[in-house]
Image (spheres, rainbow, N blue to C red):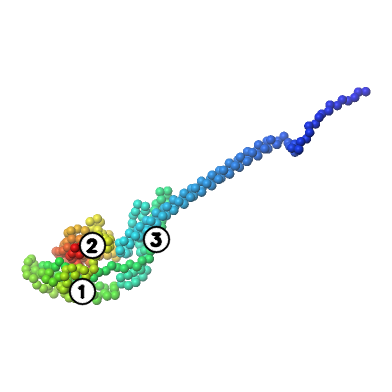
């Protein structure tokens, strides 16, 4: 009888960590590690992108803020420059600066009285940002504009005296203001001529000749007033002559030495009454200089031909009239006496 022989196999003990383990365990762990790395990279990329977007947004906000501030400064500078003129204009005024441009205009709100008006001053300043885009800011101000005024002694006030050649011409000190244009229209008659006593000479027939009384063409309240000295006549007007010449009283709309004389057909608005300052020791005006407003000449003024003017003519020195001139307003000469 043969006996079967069996080879016994010794089994390895089963360890606690071996339960449920398969041959794929190592590969699964490697895949999980790769996924974790990818997720980490995605998270870092998202954080970096968010940081970049936040930084770029902050930069753009800062640039927009700077552009807005510059636009505000431009608007405020234009507002200050406009107010420094001392007058209100009916048209839109444009100012140009290094940092941008500005437009200024006014809206009339209320007429307080004959010399005071309530306005809203509107200013829009703009700035072109180097990064692109246009920033704009608005500034609004409410103001009462009071018209500066001074007294008029006569149709012609001539502290240095006056010489009249010939008998032609009319001088009338009557108030020719249109009724209703102001509360005292047509009631404020003044003298035809105001000058110091003994300074009126009339050459009756032309060149040379004796002295006499002006012909009936002079009228007013009174026709000729010679009761004050030259300085009293000027002080009574209350004119700030130095302020007109240097712009501290009111900035000239046209400074002839810099801007040239304006063309009233194209340069001046239909309802504008400009201040024109001729900063010369001598200035000659003819028909082409006809216009309106206030004409101020630092030195002597010579009028030639058919010269027409509506408003005031202020002369620092003497005035010579050679022709047929018509002035609807007043003429004051010798104002340089106020400068000492």
Relative to 338, does residue 95 appear above or below in the rendering? above
Location of mark 1 (residue): 190
Residue 232 vs residue 245, the one in the foreground: 232
Quick one: label 1, few (<14), some, or many (20+) residues within 10 Å? many
Q: Circle 3 is placed at which residue position?
A: 139
- In this view, the residue in front, 192 or 200, is 200
Vertical arrangement, residue 48 with respect to residue 152, above or below: above
* Front tag of 2 and 3: 2
Residue at 8%, 71% in the rendered image: 211
292 is higher (above) or lower (below) than 218:
above
Give the Cα separation between the discs numbered 2 and 3: 33 Å
**Which label was assigned to residue 228?**
none
Q: Earlier in the sequence, mark 2 or mark 1?
A: 1
- Where the C terminus falls, by quadrant? bottom left
Helix, strand, or loop for circle 1? loop
Other-residue count near label 3 (Cα within 10 Å), few / some / many at <14 / 14–19 / ≥20: some
Residue reaching furthest to the right:
1
| Image mark count | 3
Q: Looking at the picture, how far across and down is residue 25, in whole percent?
A: 70, 36
Q: Is residue 195 left or right of residue 91?
A: left
Left or right of 17? Residue 289 is left
What residue is at 40 percent from the left and 48 percent from the top? 130
Q: Residue furthest left?
A: 209
């Amino acid at each position: 009888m043969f006996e079967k022989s069996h080879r016994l196999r010794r089994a390895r003990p089963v360890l606690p960590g071996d339960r449920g383990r398969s041959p794929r365990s190592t590969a699964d762990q490697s895949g999980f590690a790769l996924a974790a790395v990818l997720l980490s990279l995605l998270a870092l990329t998202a954080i970096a992108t968010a940081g970049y977007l936040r930084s770029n947004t902050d930069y753009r906000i800062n640039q927009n803020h700077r552009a807005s501030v510059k636009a505000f400064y431009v608007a405020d500078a234009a507002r200050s420059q406009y107010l420094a003129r001392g007058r209100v204009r009916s048209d839109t005024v444009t100012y140009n600066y290094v940092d941008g441009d500005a437009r200024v205009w006014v809206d009339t709100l209320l007429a307080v009285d004959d010399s005071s008006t309530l306005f809203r001053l509107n200013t829009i300043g703009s700035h072109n940002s180097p990064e692109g885009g246009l920033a704009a800011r608005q500034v609004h101000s409410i103001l009462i504009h009071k018209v500066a005024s001074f007294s008029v002694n006569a149709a012609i006030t001539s502290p240095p005296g006056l010489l009249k050649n010939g008998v032609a011409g009319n001088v009338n000190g009557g108030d020719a203001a249109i009724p209703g244009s102001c509360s005292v229209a047509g009631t404020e008659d003044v003298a035809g001529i105001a000058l110091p006593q003994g300074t009126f000479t009339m050459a009756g027939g032309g060149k040379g000749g004796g002295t006499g009384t002006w012909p009936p063409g002079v009228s007013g309240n009174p026709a000729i007033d010679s009761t004050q000295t030259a300085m009293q006549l000027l002080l009574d007007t209350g004119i700030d002559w130095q302020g007109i010449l240097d712009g501290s009283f009111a900035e000239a709309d046209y400074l002839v030495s810099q801007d040239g004389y304006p063309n009233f057909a194209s340069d001046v608005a239909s309802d504008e009454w400009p201040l024109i300052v001729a900063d010369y020791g001598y200035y000659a005006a003819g028909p082409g200089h006809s216009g309106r407003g206030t004409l101020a000449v630092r030195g002597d003024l010579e009028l030639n031909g058919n010269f027409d003017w509506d408003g005031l003519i202020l002369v620092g020195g003497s005035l010579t009239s050679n022709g047929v001139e018509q002035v609807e307003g007043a003429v004051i000469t010798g104002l340089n006496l106020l400068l000492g």
